[in-house]
Structure formats: C-alpha cells, structure tokens
Image (cartoon, rainbow, N blue to C red):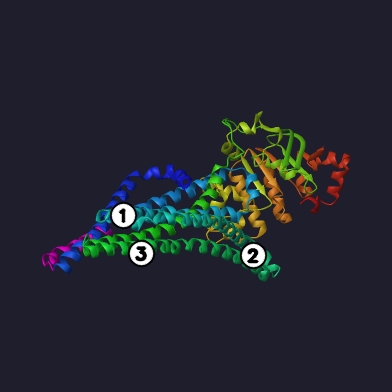
Amino acid sequence: MLKFFSRLGPYLRLYVPRFIRATAASLLYAGSVAALALLVKPIMDGLFIAHDRSELVRLPFMIIGLYFLQSLGRYVQTVDLAFIGEDVVRRIRDRLLGHILTLEYGFFGGFRGGELISRITNDISRIRGAVSQHLSVMVRESMAIVAYVGVAIYRSPILAFYGLVVAPLAAWPLAYFAQRVKKYAHRSQEKDSDITSRLSEIFNNMELIKAHHSEVFELGRFEKDNLEFRRVNMKGIRAQEMASPVMEFVGSFGVALVIWFGGLLIIDGTMSAGEFASFAVALFMLYTPLKRISKIYSQMFEAVAASERIWTMLDREPTVLGGADMLEEPIQEIAFEDVYLNYGEIAALRGVSLRARRGEMVALVGDSGGGKSSLVNLIPRLWDPVSGRVTVDGTDLRDLDLPELRRRIGIVTQRVYVFNESVACNVAYGLEIDRDLVETSLRRAGAWEFVCELEEGIDSVLDEFGANLSGGQRQRLAIARALYRQPDILVFDEATSALDNRSEAAIQKALEDVTEHCITFVIAHRLSTVEMADKVLVMQEGRVVAEGTCAELMERSEIYQRLAAGELPDAYQ
C-alpha cells in the first residue's frame, strides 16, 4: 500500500492547496462529530434527568449548527479529494498511452490489442476508485475515528481501554482478507483483459463471422470467458465481504466489556448515566467508520493490483531510441550494409546489402517469408538490425532523430488504415491540413474522382475502417496519405494489390512523376510494376539471391523467370 501511494506521490504533490483545504474540511467534520457525541451528556443529564429547561433553548440550535458544519466539511473534503483523484487518473492515463506509443513496434506483438485497452481503461478505472473515492472516505473516516476515540478517552479512560482493547485483534483478519482480495484482483484483471480482447476480435472481424455463420461459435467462446470472469470475481467478493462481519464479531467482545464494566460504574455511582451514554455513543459510532475503512481497505488492494500492472508498463523502457542528429537536406541515398534481423529465434534477414539513390525505384520480389517486408520495415525503424546497419547519406539511422526520420518516409501497406474522420483528416493524418495539398495528393493517387462523388467531398466523414469505401478506394486513399507527406523515401508494400488494372495503371503513371524526387521501394506482385523499377532484388529466406533490372534477371535468374512466368503471383503475395 505504501508503494502504491509513493508512486502516486509525484502526481499528488501538484495539488497541495487542495489537500490543505480538504484537510481543514476533514478537521471540521471530525470536530463536529466529536462535539455531537459530547452533547449526549448534557442531553441526558441536564435535559432528561435534571429537567433543565434552559437546555431546551441551547441544545437544538447547537445540534443544527454542528450538523451544518459536519455536512459542510464532508462536502468540501469529498469534492476536493475527488477532483484530485480524477485529475491524477487523467494524468496517469495520458502518460500511460503516451509511454506505450513510444515503445518499439515489436512490443505490440507480445500483447493482444484488447489487453492494452484494458490496461488503459479498466485498470486505471480501478485506480480512479481508489484515489477519487476511497481515499476521500479513508481520510474522513480516519479523522472521525480519532475524534470518537478522543471523546471516549475524555469521558472514561478505563472504559476506553476495555472498549478498544479488541481493536488490534481485528487487524490480523483484515490484513489476511486484504491479501486474498489482491490475489483475486490480479486474476480478475487478467480475465477482464481476456473479455476485452475477445470483444475486440469479434467486432473487428464481423465480416468473417457473418460470412462463416459463426455467431454461435463466437458467443460460446465469449460466454466461457465471461463465466470464468464471474467465478474469479465472486471469490474476490467473498474474501472482501468477510472483513466487516469479522470486525463486527470481534468488536462485540469490546461492547460486552464496556456494558459490563460501565454498568458497574453507574451502579457504584462513580459515573453518571449521561457520561456513560456519551461514551457509549462515541464508542458505538466509532465502529461505523472502522467498518467502512475495513471494507475500503480491501477494495484498495484491487487498485494496488491494477497499479502494479500499470507501473510495470510504465517502467518498461523502449528499445528503439532516436539519436540527436537532424536531417537538414533531402535524403539522397539509403544503404543497407550487411544487415541481419531476427524475430526472436527466427532469422528474417541474413547479410542483406544494397544501395538506392534519389530518383531510383527498387522492386523487391520473392516467395512468401523471403524477407521483403522485413527489409522495408527497417527504413522507418519499426525494427533495428541485430547486426549491420542502415544509413541515409552515410549517417546510421540510429543516430538520427526518430520523429524527423519518420517524417521523411511515406509508407503504403497492403493492410489499409482508415479512421472515422473526414477524407482530409485521413489524407493529412498526423499533419496540419492543407486543402490544396490534400487535393493534389488525391489526384496523384487516382482517388480524386471517387472523393468528389462523396456528399461533402474531402470533408466527408468516413466510416470506421473505411467501411463505406471499396477495397480499391481505401488503398488509393492510403497512397494519397503517403504522397501528402512529400516524402524523401516512399515504400509500397504490395500497395496496389487491391486495385483493378485501370486503377493500377493510373497509379503507375503517377509513380513515374513521384519517383523522380524520392527513393522508392516497391514490394511488387505484378510484372508491370516490376518493369518500372531501376533495380529488382529477388529475395529468398532472408537473402538477396539475384539483383539487376527486369531484363537482366529474365536472362540469368531461374527464380525470377519462374516468378515472372506466373505474373509474380500468389506465392508471395
């Protein structure tokens, strides 16, 4: 628990003025409840026993005033601490997503998308409950406990000893059940991630589910995860709800001792009925905040378990870091120097070397798994080579400022990403919108014609994943996005695979103009695209097995001849 609050310390220090006001409000609340307990003596002795009429004038107004102060203190303290908690959670959520976005591309392969979403939403929501709600209650009730204990000791130190001697006995079961709650909270959060991941898979693959009529199958898998989630949650609830009954049972021994010994004092005449009533009210009211704190203490361990998952993520350092060098001029040359790349134990690239200059187009062909995509993924540093290096104009990519490098690169992949934003926002993604440049990019990508047919043109909002566009339209939009960046290096990873022959011909014509001003890499699946390239690399098992122009390879490379005979087909799409 201390570690939990120590990690929150840097955030909480930003709210010192609100903490001071919340503390003052808590003291006002505690003082009011203590005064109400003290009023029991004059009510009993002065009003009910002595029949003092003057108390009828004084006591009602005092009670109203004290309840007003108590309510005011409670309101101010709750609102201030709730604001602190909500704002701390906002900052942690922003920081967590910001940190995750800085991690290397390979990191995301080790997590399901739903699991990361769960960390940012569900786990942080558990922390939210702790710092915006539970913390407020714990501070307020702790102040109340101090006030009630003070009243009890003031009225009778001996009775206070008998009434409070059992309190330490309740600490052990409270700690025991809190640890069990933490254990089940960890498991619950894992199951929550499973459910989020399952839902993400279902909604992202609805076309496949409908086409295969697998709704019942998917529902069955979800019901299994959901049932396991309920089972784990019930174990946590049972452990959490045991704390209050145990405290009440242990506390009953203290109450019994107080009644027995207090009765003796009253019978002996050493204590008035009003004093005993005042003490009893303070003692009995003391158990209410104790029970609340015991329940919240268990719930806090759910937040502790969630925070451990969050701190683990925040403590992870990115392995792909940028350098300090900036690119002052357009990139003239990129070179791969004896590059090796592994995915875990699997070798993806083995000793690849090549150079490409501004104005050149390099086509990569080969069988599936040959290393074509792995090679181009080194350019924006989605991965770093385990051996060798990649340079631009003689500077190692690892020495360059990473955002600056990636701003110089335009990438179009076979998998197209379309956001639930306007056409203009999709084309200018991540950059300021220049409407003239958006139009120019759409025209060069062969997308202007269909965009003009949309109701609001470039201001038309596209459906999520581009559901209201055809596959070819989505791909042309992705090409326009890459061209909008006016890149020095342009990468087409099977980017025209979803286009018909007419559309592809238009893109190829546009590429002729584009490639004059940048370095272009094309992973090709059609011979017509390869014929445009200044250099063709044939890749197999992570190696370049042949290199040359299309005509040269047709003469001397059997592998290329085989691929070309099949129109560079499905084998490596």
* Residue 327 in picture, x, y percent from top left: 58, 32
Tag 1 or tag 2, which sits nearer the N-term?
1
> Tag on residue 149?
1
Is 135 placed above or below 539 here? below
- The residue where tag 2 is placed is 206
**Disc 3 packing (10 Å; few <14; some 14–19; many ≥20):** few
User: From the viewer's perspective, is the residue at label 3 or at label 1 nearer?
Assistant: 3
Where is residue 401 drawn, in percent x and y? 57, 34
Q: Secondary structure at mark 1?
A: helix
Q: Few, some or many C-alpha atoms within 10 Å of disc 1 (few <14, some 14-19, many ≥20)?
A: many
Q: Amino acid at mark 1?
A: Val
Please tell me whether residue 102 is drawn above or below residue 422 in the rendered image.
above
Which residue is identified by label 3? 256
Estimate the spatial distance between the alpha carbons at disc 3 and disc 1, rounded to whole Å: 18 Å
Q: Is residue 393 visible?
A: no
**What's the distance in space between the residues labelled 2 and 1, CA to CA?**
61 Å
| Tag 3: amino acid | Ala
Q: Amino acid at mark 2?
A: Met
Marks 3 and 2, how far apart at CA: 64 Å
Percent across and percent down for residue 492 are 69, 46
Q: Is residue 69 magenta?
A: yes
- Callout 2 secondary element: helix
Q: Are the residues flagged by discs 2 and 1 in contact, CB closer than 8 Å? A: no
Residue 190 on image: x %, y %: 59, 56
Q: Residue at x 30, y 52 (%)?
A: 26
Q: Is residue 379 left or right of residue 370?
A: left
Secondary-structure class at tag 3: helix
* Tag 3–tag 2 contact (CB < 8 Å): no
Q: Confirm whether the magenta stretch covers residue 60.
A: yes
Relative side of 197 to 344, left or right = left
Q: Which residues are magenta?
A: 51-72
